[in-house]
Amino acid sequence: MFIDSAELYVKAGDGGSGCIAFRREKFVPKGGPSGGDGGRGGHIILRADRHLTTLLDFKYRKKYVAGRGQHGSGDNRTGRNGRDVVIRVPAGTVVLDHESGNVLEDLVEDAQEVVVARGGRGGRGNARFASASNQAPREFEPGFDGEERNLRLELKLLADVGLVGLPNAGKSTLLSRISAARPKVAEYPFTTLIPNLGLVRVGDTGSFVAADIPGLVEGAHDGKGLGLTFLKHIERTRVLVILLDATSSALENDYATLLDEMNLYDPWLLRRPRIIAYNKCDIIEKEFSGLERTITGQLQTFLISAVRGDGIEEMVNALWNMLNELDV
């Protein structure tokens, strides 16, 4: 099951209390203070893991508490620190404070970490309070409370290429054609209910990751259809493929709808490099000519058939070249 948002409560460990103790040695009946400090409470740490692809775990567990620091003891022994709790999340997870909405960290790289709740400091033992005027202090310091907070996690998939189109434009079929991914494919709108990732091989050594985003409809930026839920997954893509159904009788309107929804959601999406792919050209290849140029202007345009494979290799090579140019 694909889950791309979650809420959880985290509580770092409290610090251990300091100790009141005095040395007891043979022939030294009035030894000095020897109470040790308490240990630090455990931290709550979020760590990105590239092998994870969903926030599903947080549907069943929403509370994480780190270990308490141990109390100090005699002979100036400091208590052991509390056990840290490391929570693994998918790479691409944005960590936000639930109350303020502030972004605490954007975990985009594998093994990247952020401490979201710090353990409380351990209290001082009575040895820390000794002075020339107070050589046998009976003071100690209790441990400090660990931080606690409510978090919101938002997963934004990491992909090089995003496939964007209206429902039933053939995005899932295209992804299954160019990669080993096997998303659900059917002849009705909104077959794709979750984003799908596929690794696209180019030649003997090249590869890139493509994401199939559920179909957009007019009003997607306001939550209509599945748009608001999944538009965020194209925020990180480096190149967009605008997939249009060549059999549509309103191609200009289809293209304008997609651009409008992306612009209303985030204007920066329109600054992303993109190409246009007209799918299902095998059905009307004798009738389809010239119109695509009037729609797309100077953008690279490809006439393809995701089912039959026409034009696919040319389009994949063009995407690979665009990605390489972005790396320069």
Image (cartoon, rainbow, N blue to C red):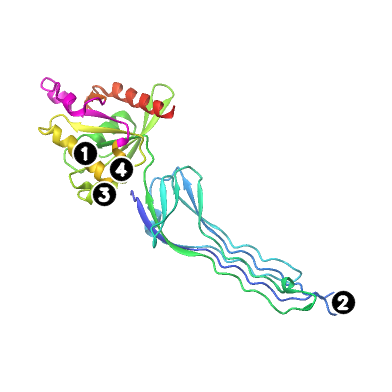
| Left-right relation of 136 to 50 | right
Q: Earlier in the sequence, mark 1 or mark 4?
A: 4
Question: What amino acid type is highlighted by mark number 1?
Answer: Leu
- Report helix, strand or loop for mark 4: loop
Where disc 2 sits, the SS reads loop
Nearer the camera: disc 1 or disc 2: 1
Using the numbered discs, state the Cα–Cα distance from disc 3 to disc 1 in whole angstroms.
Answer: 13 Å
Give the residue drawn at x 74%, y 68%.
76
Tell me which label, 1 or 2, sits earlier in the chain. 2
Span of residues in magenta: 271-299
**Above or below, 131 relative to 55:** below
* Residue at 30% in and 22% down: 313
Secondary element at image label 3: helix
The quadrant in which residue 78 appears is bottom right
- Give the Cα distance between marks 1 and 2: 85 Å
Give the amino acid type for the residue marked by disc 2 in the picture: Val
Q: For mark 1, does the 10 Å Cα neighbourhood hold few (<14), some (14 to 19), or many (20 or more) residues? A: many
Give the residue type that dot 4 points to: Pro
Residue identifier under label 4: 195
